[in-house]
Amino acid sequence: MSVAVFAQEATEQESDSVKKELAKIQKPKVPKSFYIPTGLRVGTDLVALGVNAFGDKRTRYEFQGDIDFHRIYLVGSYGINEYQNSGEEFTYSNEGSYYRIGLEADFLQYDPDHNTLTFGLRYAKSNFSETLITNITNPFYGLYEESLTNKNVKASWIEMTAGLRVMILKNLYMGYNFRIQLNRRIVNADQFRTYDIPGFGRAEFDNRWTFNYYLVYRIKWKEKKLMEKPR
């Protein structure tokens, strides 16, 4: 009888010990004050500036901003785009703008420099007009031009993103974003099939991937606090 009682007491003591150890390694609760935004990051896409400098078909400028709510970032970007392509029998051009908005989660929550490794989801929309001029040879009228225009075209899609930002100087960051663009939709393209979409690219693809490289400056109005690592 005494052996059974002793064994029961040992089991209870072991159980209490395990509970105490689990309590020690339990993740600390995030204070509500951590969810108050501490700053705004604004920047521009260096890939777009490189295309402008070294390409001859596209001119694009894109700006991005995000604001932090602890590990969650509200992200938005806006861009303007002009594109022109021509061949022996056609000239195509478009002009428009686009925006993206969404949320990203940061997985570098203990980094003192506030570098970020993020994964997120965004909604994107583009508004633009496009023109196609074709050279047509007719046996009766000879060579003539036909001009077609899609006005007020709208396109939308969803993006899954993965990105990294690393501080290179105080409050100045550089980093990339990979985007998987999904479920592309186009409306108001009534005169001819859309060829290129600002912010998306070639319209022949319903899904595609793209890459951006940003230079970002952080405007802080409050010191961003860090959670303590679990011991």
Image (cartoon, rainbow, N blue to C red):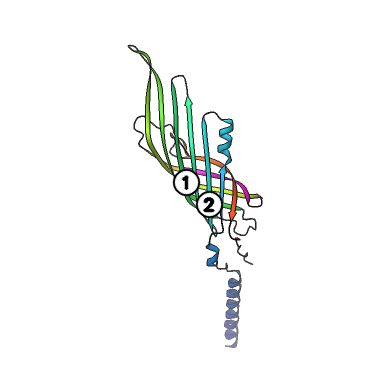
Residue at far right of view? 169
Where 121 sits versus 30, above or below?
above
Q: On the picture, is 79 further left or further right than 173? A: left
Q: Where does residue 221 sit, x and y in percent of width and height?
A: 58, 58
Structural crowding at the residue carrying mark 2, measured as other residues with C-alpha within 10 Å and reported as few (<14), some (14–19) or many (≥20): many
Residue at far left of view? 140
Residue found 52% across the figure and 29% down from its top:
57
Structural crowding at the residue carrying mark 1, measured as other residues with C-alpha within 10 Å and reported as few (<14), some (14–19) or many (≥20): many
Q: How many marks?
A: 2
Under tag 2, what secondary structure?
Answer: strand
User: In which quadrant will I find the C terminus?
Assistant: bottom right
Residue found 52% across the figure and 66% down from its top:
32
Under tag 1, what secondary structure?
Answer: strand
Instruction: State the residue position of label 2.
Output: 66
Q: On the picture, is 116 further left or further right than 145? A: right
Tell whether position 81 is magenta: no
Residue found 37% across the figure and 32% down from its top:
150
Looking at the rendered structure, the kind of residue marked 2 is: Asp
Which of marks 2 and 1 precedes in the sequence? 2
Q: Which residues are magenta?
A: 169-181
Residue 151 sits in which quadrant?
Answer: top left
Residue at far bottom of view? 2
Prevalent SS, magenta region: strand
Where 40 sits versus 93, above or below?
below
Which of the numbered marks, if any, corresponds to residue 175? none
Residue 112 sits in which quadrant?
Answer: bottom right
Q: Where does residue 51 sit, x and y in percent of width and height?
A: 56, 34
Tell whether position 171 is magenta: yes
Looking at the rendered structure, the kind of residue marked 1 is: Arg
Instruction: State the residue position of label 1.
Output: 100
Q: Where does residue 114 sit, x and y in percent of width and height?
A: 62, 55
Mark 1–mark 2 distance (CA, rounded to whole Å): 11 Å
